[in-house]
Amino acid sequence: MTSTAATTAITELRRALGEEKVSTAPVDLIANGRAVWPVELKQARRAMLGEIEFDIPACVVRPGSTDDVCTVLRIADELRVPVIPYGGGSGIVGGTVPPPGSISLDTKALNHIDVDPVSMIARVGAGCFGIELETALNSQGFTFGHYPQSLYVSTVGGWIATRASGTFSTLHGNIEDRVIGLDVVLPGGKLLSLAPSPRSATGPDLKSCFIGSEGAFGVITAATLELVPTGRPRLHQACVFPTFQQGLDAVQHFIQAGARPAVVRLYDSGETAHKFANFSIPAEGAMLLLIFEGTGTIIERESEVVEEICRGAGGHSAGAGPVDHWWQTRFDTSSLAAGNCGEGGYADAIEVSALWGDLPAVYASMLQVATDHGARAFAHVSHVYQSGACLYVIFAGEAKTDRDAIDAYQAVVDGLLASCLANNGAVSHHHGVGRGKARSLAAQHGPAGMEALTALKQAFDPHNIMNPGVLGLGEMVR
Amino acid sequence: MTILSSQVTSVLPVALGHDPTASLCPWVQATRSTADYPSRKAQIAIAILNGTLTPTSDVVDLMYRCDGLCRCQPLPGQPDPTAYTNLIHDARAALVSGGFVSAAEQWATNWREYGNVYGRIELDESWLDRDSPSSAVLYVPGTASLFLDPAAAAANVQLLRRAFGSVTIDPELLDAGYVLRQLGLQTEWEAERDRVRELVARGGYQAVVTTTPREAIGLATALADQAAVVSSLLDSVQPWMTSMRTHLRPPDSRISFALQPTEEMAVERESAIILLEHLAHCSGREIVTLAPEATSPAAIERPILPSTEQLSRRFAETCADELLELHDGENLVVLTVDPFSKRALADQLGARARVVNVAAFLCEHLEGERTDA
């Protein structure tokens, strides 16, 4: 359904940007009508089979420059038409669900990359795919060092808007640690250009308002990123612990002792058995994968220290084989996809974070909730910090129909997040909030926190045109 | 509950997948459009086959924007690429049979009148060499080669004759007809498949050689239960080429190979690598490179679906840009077996690189006569 305002917007956008940048072709509307949130996948499955209509925006706009984005937001704001920024479409929390009559603002044509080798930074268009960025940087001797599982389909703007993490985060940091400049177009069409600087004490960091804002405050069009030299030696090392808890103890210990492997991934016994079936692991065994990166002498010494701590916690070396196996399959998302393919099937990964002191209880309670809902679940810890870690819970279940699966899925998610909150965890570590976790975010922040977020929203987007519903701000779409 | 065909079930993991390699698709790179993701194309194809989507012109265009390059399939855990390509071909067949593809009638007419989908071919019959003795090796040149690049087709024959001594070319079988399947002309494809099977069986050939790997796959499908071994030109001459490697004259340019990845990724790739290794060996220096992810050719169907011509040019431009990025400023020769790739890349690269048919290149650089049969 296209509203009168949207129809007028389409006419004006075409006049201002040209026909080719404003599409109302069904294939474009259907394509940008979803990302990969399980609810969207179930709806898409139903639509493919003719049970319901596809969810679609009124149009898809593909700006080719920041000026184009300014034009879109000026027109949309004047006509009060919702705008949904859309990058690679890899989001799994419902962050790009189009309300009827909305504009899907697709950033993928904003894909320029300019490298400054002297300062080791790159100014990058928001719509640049991760792998495009890496390929371009590698040819000049650099890497961004940010390798999410979605590297080949997610965009730089999407990483920033969702406050993303990559698998090498323990060494290279998360996205917020690597962005030193940002261009954001605000509703009404004004460009906010936050110039790159290594650090500044010029009042509150305005970039922080937009890193993780999920398109609710404006549209990120470009960013300046800090780079790392490529080709640094890496060392793969795996270790098996008799129990998950012993593994947790070891990771906490070596991180707090100052070791910083680039990759730290500790799998519980369920996921260890699932993922490393070809390796001989004891029944309750928990696999720890480590990748060290840096100069040879440093990583050798660092790995010795970590190995010693792991041994002290009851672990024993499993060689490099399990890490090599993970490396080869690190972009593989087929299990999650398969879980959502069958009628009534649902599957997802929920990533939360907790302090070390709370992590065991968060883990135990979340797995119990999944079991109570009749879903299968296992988990791993990744992205570790001095104070705690990210817990990644993967679950799958079945309902009778796809419609039932949506309800069952949402009930499991709500239950998992409630148990996380009850044990002092944070409801998202790096996927963001979208619409799928919006209710839980309100419980996390409380009334005062949501009032503060709402005030920010009101300041940047007084007419509530920007991605309404994400972060629990504005009208919920679904 | 909706009962799904096994064909649809097998591609649901693509349609509802996370597109872990979408950005590698040249169409996604050229259009920057989410609609070009494999998942979205599979989703649209399923909706077409289920009759739940009206095939508007953009739907038709989208279905013809997949060239079976399979760049979207290289990571472990990806669904069977053949299933995805078959789905797209089935959707095209549904569109054609529903009368939604305006160009289809012309393709079918051309096929009936000229034996190919492109139009009248002025065939230089001299290279058919009708008087040569019958051979156990049948060469099916493909009408795309004959239509677009007859000189390359002649070079292909010359190379095959040097490799095998003699080859048969059957004027009744100049094309295996797989292009019909690719274009969605299912009725014509099924009829042609039966005819091809009969002709090959009657000839009693031991080996059948096609120009491109894509045609080899199509022909192998048609001849699945026959004894004849089907291979693409480069694969077929690879053992002979290895025996002739000491006769290879080093090229004076940097060589890249515009590999044509297909539904079955292994086809031709190994032979291309071996050829490049031979070239590197005889040159004694780094003059060759194989970068299939950067050198995929332009689309085989593109020039004959007018509505996507502009995108087709952008597609070739993307491939050419990638090549130049890899070899900027070098004296570059790009080898290819695909006549469409040759034309599209040559158009885009202009004077910046030379695009050469691989058989012509080998005939020029292989000195001496055939050493074994």
Image (spheres, coloured by chain):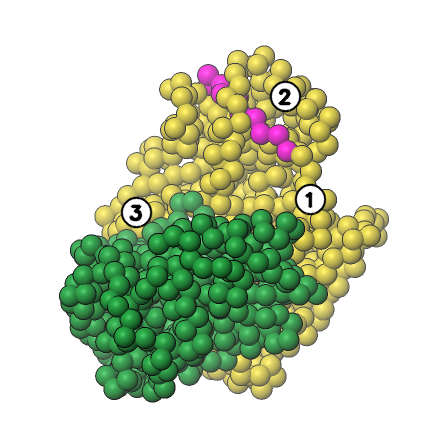
Chain colours: A yellow, B green
Tell me the kind of residue under disc 2.
Val
Tell me the kind of residue under disc 3.
Gly
| Spatial CA span between label 1 and label 2 | 24 Å
Tell me the kind of residue under disc 1.
Thr
Q: Name the residue nearer the viewer: B229 or B205.
A: B205
Share a chain, discs 1 and 2? yes
User: Which chain is home to disc 2?
Assistant: A
Please say whether residue A110 is visible from this viewpoint: yes
- Queried whether the magenta region covers residue B209, the answer comes back as no
Q: Name the residue nearer the viewer: B245 or A207.
A: B245
Question: Which residue is rendered at x = 37% and y = 64% of the image?
Answer: B161
- Reading the image, the residue beneath label 1 is A230
Range of magenta residues: A234-246
The C terminus of chain A sits in image quarter: bottom left
User: Which chain is home to disc 3?
Assistant: A
Q: In the rendering, which numbered label is found on residue A345?
A: 3
Question: Which residue is rendered at x = 53% and y = 51% of the image?
Answer: B246
Please say whether residue A90 is visible from this viewpoint: no
Q: Earlier in the sequence, mark 1 or mark 2?
A: 1
| Spatial CA span between label 1 and label 3 | 42 Å
The N terminus of chain A sits in image quarter: bottom left
Is residue B146 placed above or below B81 in the rendered structure?
below
